[in-house]
Amino acid sequence: MMAAHDSHATVRESVESVLAQTVPELELIVVDDGSQVPIADALSGIRDERLRVIRRERNRGPAVARNVALREARSEFVSQLDSDDLWHPDYLESVLPRFDDPDVGLVYANVRILRHPHGREIAIVNAPRHPVDYFPDICGPCPIPSPTVTVRREAIRGVGGYARWLRAAEDHHLYVKLARAGWRFDYVDRPLATYRYPTAESGMSHDLNRVRKQSLKMWIAFMLRHPLTPGPRRQVRVRLGYRLRRGSG
């Protein structure tokens, strides 16, 4: 499933990377999240019955768009890919066999990074630490590369999908909900996708202040719901302290 908002410059390449998978049995649901010009215009000429585009007139954020796709999904497994990132051709071929273990609810892999400001080439450099599906470690900076996540559909629906009240950090919130629900994660130690590092012109996570606000909101909500779970309380304390030192509202 792919949420897309005004990403006409990149969405076609992202879609084509999904349709080029070595596992051909798939469906790709692109949710146009209130783009000024319909995303379908950027996908004109792609004739593939596996592709569906759903247009929403109002921009409600990636969590809502992903939930729309989740309701429409028919597969036993659902994957998330932003409309400016790319899957490598063997992505599905590599992650799907890990679900042979019925206790595994989420599988992820390493990811290559384009245009990182400090030249970093991959996201995960300490492979023995992964998979991270335990508290409090999952509560630090998000350890799971978003473009490489596939989830068992019953697992994601069982925890209520993505939090529509979050405009950022909704993916990390989903992972901690799955871990709290007892699902195990698995990790493929190879770069299976390419992540475009956000810039001021593209990528919502470029606005770090906005992301920090949403992350704080996420941890407060999770702490109140699960007060005895180790990790969230410390995150709230650290993030509130940071905002107070910075004088942020």
Image (cartoon, rainbow, N blue to C red):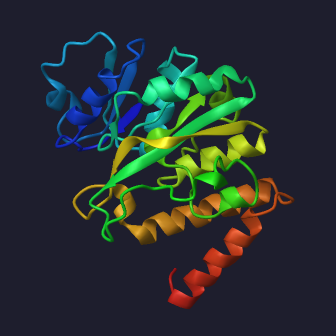
At which x and y percent is residue 80? 46, 35
Front residue of 175/5: it is: 175
x 34%, y 13%: residue: 50
x 51%, y 33%: residue: 67
Residue 108 located left or right of residue 26 = right
At which x and y percent is residue 194? 34, 45
Q: Is residue 63 visible?
A: no
x 59%, y 35%: residue: 107
Q: Is residue 166 visible?
A: yes
Front residue of 57/203: it is: 203
Q: Does 244 sit above or below residue 95?
A: below
Q: Does 181 sit above or below residue 226?
A: above
In the image, farthest residue toward the right: 228
Residue 158 located left or right of residue 150 = right
Quadrant showing the N terminus: top left
x 54%, y 47%: residue: 171
At which x and y percent is residue 43? 18, 27
Q: Does 81 sit above or below residue 171?
A: above
